Image: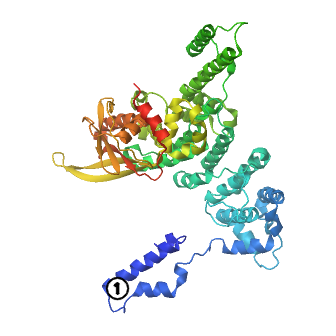
Amino acid sequence: MLLKYTIDDQTKQKEILKYIGDFESELDTNLKNHYFSKVLSQYPKFIKRENIHYSTLEKVVKETVPPYLRSNSERSREKIKEIISLIEDYIIKKNNSEINTKALFGKLVKYEVNKCFKFIFQNSNEFKRKIYNTLISYIINIPINDGFNLIKIDGRAIHYYELRLLVYLRLNYQFDVVYFKQFAQPIFNDLQNNEEKVDLTLFEVLPIFKKYLGDPKQIDDLILTHRFVNGIWKNGSKFLHFYTLHNEEHSVELIKYCTQITKSIDYLSIKKYDYYILFLACYLHDIAMVIYPNLHDFGKTNDLDSELAITKWKNNLQNQKINKYATHSDISKFILETFEVVNNYFEATIRKDHHNRAAEFIKNQKDLNFLELLTRRIVAEISKGHCIERKDVYGLKSKAKDDVVSEKYLMIILRLADLMDMSKDRVSVNILKQSIRNMPKESQFQWISHLAIDKCTLDSEFKCNPIETEKKLEIAEKVVFTIYLNTRVLTSIENIDCKKGNKALNCKVCKDSIEIKLEENTCSDCNFMSKWMMKKHSYLFDELISLQTYLDRNSKKSVFNTSFKVILNMSNTDKLPSVFIDVVNKKLHEL
């Protein structure tokens, strides 16, 4: 079994065989009864991968389908359309048990299997699925199997229509040709969108979709959502140019973090349908940040922010004394200040209300009509929850695990995942170096802070504690957030309070790490790095404190007693320039 599940890693296979040999040597030093070692050495087929599920079909299709189809995307597309149209012939002729297998495979001259194909095709849905998977995979030039490694052999890009068809075929183990026809036909009716090249970041989450969902329709919805988000973010956001990435790359990272959170925090276990809603929310929760605002909203009387901006503009006008005698320099300065006022207004408006705007967008956007209306409404609520007040999330009345959708849990998971996406991949070091002088101070601090972080991981440690008075076991679950830093500044820094809410963050500083616990203690062992990360990730610590309070309040409902800590793992592999450290130092000393 171990060898079976390491078929793609020969190094691991050799290690397993070595362990077996060492184990048998301990039992018998005379080498007479080394049964397993002898068998495995004599029969290499035990550790050799054989594609037995598709070997016959692959042999047939290679000799009957013209190979030139694989090198021409237009011809291959037409051939696939022809194969799909044959499904209709099958449906019509189903009653008299006829199916034109020659039309599928060409001339079966060398194989006396036509009658066999007809018999099995009429009686096995699984065989039908494998036939269509074999044909389409071969024509598209992708290895013939049931895996999700959908990379073309010739290195060409895969298109969305190809990906959607193959994912449906390779995952759908309750295959039905009628449903496949209904699924495939709209794809070819909308080739304008489905002929787009697939964004490669999608392949990072396809195995996650397969593992946590398994439903072909739900996975197809997520593929379409990824395509939509990727397309709408291609030119970025005009008014949020110096913001960290909130596009499909951010969404993919959130999906990964969500699965880590549900595995590491036992109380936040969710159902399969919950994962579908959660993954959609990962894609769509920030979608309003890219939408170009209505410029005519500026100056509305009921908008306090625009009133303040206009007042500031009037003050600038008076201060600069703009009239017919104004100098060129005065006018240039006034125009730049006016531009800054208007730009800051729209930037602040987009940022502060993007969760509400995203919820409305999700519910009303016609391009998302492939999602059911009820699904979109639930996703909108979950998406909105990533930015609302913590008390409104943790105080939400919910049956959680008994509800059809565990909205409260999904909001908590999405919020945590959003805060965990903190690595340097969210910024561009080249843009930072070229534009740091022109960036707002807050953006400077945020970008430099991201640049200092390689990754964030989440692990759990468990320990059983018997409770003698109640005669039961309590499992102590310690959830550890580890932030890997690529820089290290251990100088002391004073006059900055580490207290968060009603709890203090208790720091324990070691040579290469800092351990931060949520405890009722005074924080006295801090340095530059701990103060920096507490400032940068204040929302994360606030969220953990709220989650800790919520879990403590519900501890009687669970055998798990959960606590949190954050570890800053420091190295000096990518030392930041002193000018970057100066920016951080100034930010930390702001009142």
Front residue of this view, candidates 317 and 213: 317
- Residue 301: tell me if it is visible: no
Q: How many marks?
A: 1
Q: Position of residue 42 (x, y in %)?
A: 50, 88
Which SS class for mark 1?
A: helix
Indicate left or right for 62 with 13 as reference.
Answer: right
* In the depicted structure, whether residue 414 falls above or below residue 96: above
Q: What's the residue at 48%, 47% (across, down)?
A: 257
Occupied quadrant, residue 350? top right
Q: Position of residue 271 (x, y in %)?
A: 47, 46
Chosen colour scheme = rainbow
Q: What's the residue at 61%, 49% (across, down)?
A: 219
* In the depicted structure, whether residue 146 falls above or below residue 552: below
Q: Position of residue 232 (x, y in %)?
A: 68, 38
Indicate left or right for 295 with 1 as reference.
Answer: right
Q: Which residue is disc 1 drawn over? A: 25
Which residue is the extreme one toward the left? 469
- Residue 307: tell me if it is visible: yes
Occupied quadrant, residue 437? top right
* In the depicted structure, whether residue 416 falls above or below residue 130: above
Q: Position of residue 22 (x, y in %)?
A: 37, 81
Front residue of this view, candidates 319 and 163: 319
Front residue of this view, candidates 321 and 400: 321
Front residue of this view, candidates 405 and 510: 510
User: Which amino acid lies under the numbered mark 1 shown in the image of this protein?
Assistant: Ser
